Image (cartoon, rainbow, N blue to C red):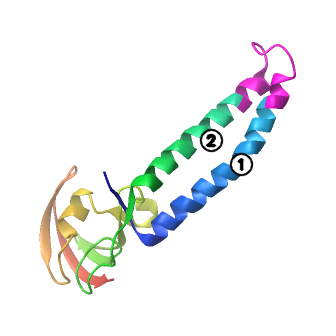
Amino acid sequence: MKILFTKPGFEKLKKDYEILVKTRPLAVLDLKKAREMGDLSENGYYKSARFKLNGIDMNIRHLNFLIKFAIIASDPKKGIVGIGSKVDLKISGKNKKYLIVGENEANPTEEKMSFLSPIGKDLIGKKAGEKINVNSPSGKMQVEIIKVIP
């Protein structure tokens, strides 16, 4: 199994992992303090501390899995859309800019498009000036690649 990331995406992943590992001892300490308060069945502080520690542990396991199977995508070739490319697109007549990223980095609000998304799949390997027809969940649309920046 391999999970593709851009180099900045992988660095962020490792940083997030390190932050969680550093916050875990404080969460364990909170749980210990809550446990010392007595009756656990009616102890909201205990339940909250346990929930927080479980969340941290779950996220650590998830990030550890991603790091274990992560592969940093090679730099895209100049002028050809690949993972790590910045693309200027015209989608159904509207200009949009996206960074093509791995599936775990995708975030439309940050203009990061997964290479596995309906549009992303069809963009990989294409060049500026090409027009493609994409079947997306919202229907067919035409996408024109205006510019590709590696």
The residue depicted at 82 percent of the width and 13 percent of the height is: 39
Residue 127 is covered by the magenta coloring: no
Q: Which residue is mark 1?
A: 23
Is 54 drawn above or below residue 78 in the view shown?
A: above
Is 81 drawn above or below residue 104 in the view shown?
A: below
Q: Nearer the viewer, residue 44 or 54?
A: 54
User: What span is in magenta?
Assistant: 32-49
**Residue type (three-letter) at the residue carrying disc 2:** Ile
Q: Position of residue 95 (x, y in %)?
A: 30, 75
Badge 1 density bin: few <14, some 14–19, many ≥20, Cα 10 Å: few
Residue 45 is covered by the magenta coloring: yes
Q: Which residue is mark 2?
A: 56
Residue 94 lies in quadrant:
bottom left
**Residue type (three-letter) at the residue carrying disc 1:** Thr
| Residue, far bottom | 78
The residue depicted at 57 percent of the width and 45 percent of the height is: 60
Q: Nearer the viewer, residue 12 or 145?
A: 12
